Image: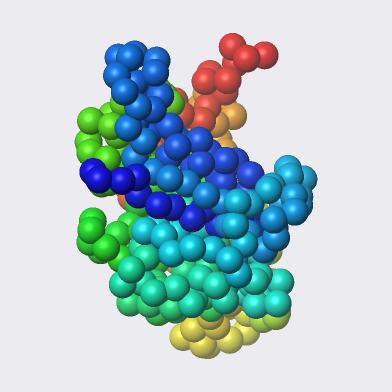
Amino acid sequence: MDRPISILLMAPAQVSASSLFGLQDTLVAAGRDWETLVTGERETPVFDVKLVGPDLSPYPCGRGVRIAPDVTFNTAPESDLVIVPGLELSPWDRPSRPDHPGLEWLASLDTTRTRIVSACSGAIYLAETGLLNGVEATTHWAFEDVFRRSYPQVRLRLDRGLCFAEADRGPVTSGGTTGWQELALFLIAHYGGAQRAARAAKVWLMADRGELQAPFASMIRATPHDDAPVRAAQIWIAENYAVENPVRRMAAMSGLPPTTFARRFREATGKSPMNYVQAIRIEEARQLLETSSAPVAEVGEQVGYEDTAYFRRLFKKKTALTPAEHRRMFGTARFSHFE
């Protein structure tokens, strides 16, 4: 490596402080911390990281943490990489260009010379500039609906912790919130080598996340829509998820032909009626696993599944964990010693 890889880390006013400074800390430390703490070798930094924002004067981000960029969008030099950290954005609406001056700058970059990557909801900026059209991408699970409505050309993979088509070029996206750690390790491994990535993981105690976004994602979110029969069906099923033939009953209650009800339900919620019922049931099962010691078979029965084997398979398919694994990860036993 002849010189450090130059990185411009975007710091708009909407940036998440933990994502921004977490990325900055770990990337600046690559080639430095291990050498200082362990081997005493000469420091060989992998990256030269600068913050780029709308102004050089310090300003508060969404959580009130003050940010002082090194360069502005108008004066930023060319760089090897641009990283969009997690952003505090609406999970329903596209960001408006006037409120997000970094979008115009991002769109102006020559992607044959500068690679653009993102963490968490920063993928919204990449989607806005068209960089994700036709490619697989991931983001925080809470932004599924805005992608579905506003960026249908993006092949969204919320089950993935990290998405990229080619290791050497093109966009890279990582999953929600602390998913910036996976992005940091990818960049360190790719540009600095696997050994430096392993050292960073040891210094920063970064566990192997694998494809662990699905276990954290809420399966039901309050997607805004104006379809009254669908909304009434959602309210009803929230209290009656364990009944037999729930889809048939919702359609009958709506007064619509079954095919019309199914079409309108999918348009309003992004899910078919059956998938929505399954999501409601599995989300309720999660709550029972987290807050009670009821056997898995009993949990399945309470949410509408008398066939325990089928319930276990469906739970694993939807969450990437078995019911027992979910209980170990999120149940009260994990946190009881903190009390």
Q: Give the color scheme: rainbow, by chain, secondary structure or one colour.
A: rainbow
Question: Is residue 93 shown to the viewer in this render?
Answer: no
Please, is residue 203 above or below residue 267 in the view? above
Q: Toward which corner of the image does residue 33 lie, by quadrant?
A: top left
Which residue is located at x 51 percent, y 41 percent?
24
Q: Toward which corner of the image does residue 239 lie, by quadrant?
A: bottom right
Question: Is residue 84 shown to the viewer in this render?
Answer: yes
Which residue is located at x 23 percent, y 30 percent?
195
Please, is residue 200 above or below residue 61 in the view? above
Number of callouts in the render?
A: 0
Q: Toward which corner of the image does residue 55 lie, by quadrant?
A: bottom right
Please, is residue 84 above or below residue 251 in the view? above
Position of the C terminus, as image quadrant, is: top right
Position of the N terminus, as image quadrant, is: top left
Which residue is located at x 74 percent, y 50 percent?
58
Q: Where residue 338 sits: x, y (%)?
A: 62, 14
Q: Where residue 295 sits: x, y (%)?
A: 45, 27
Q: Where residue 241 sits: x, y (%)?
A: 56, 55
Which residue is located at x 62 percent, y 84 percent?
255
Q: Nearer the viewer, residue 147 or 216?
A: 147
Q: Nearer the viewer, residue 1 or 333?
A: 1
Q: Where residue 45 sits: x, y (%)?
A: 36, 36
Q: In this view, does 195 lie to the left or right of 32?
A: left
Q: Which of 123 and 235 is in front in this view?
A: 123
Q: Is residue 339 left or right of residue 285?
A: right
Q: In this view, does 205 lie to the left or right of 163?
A: right
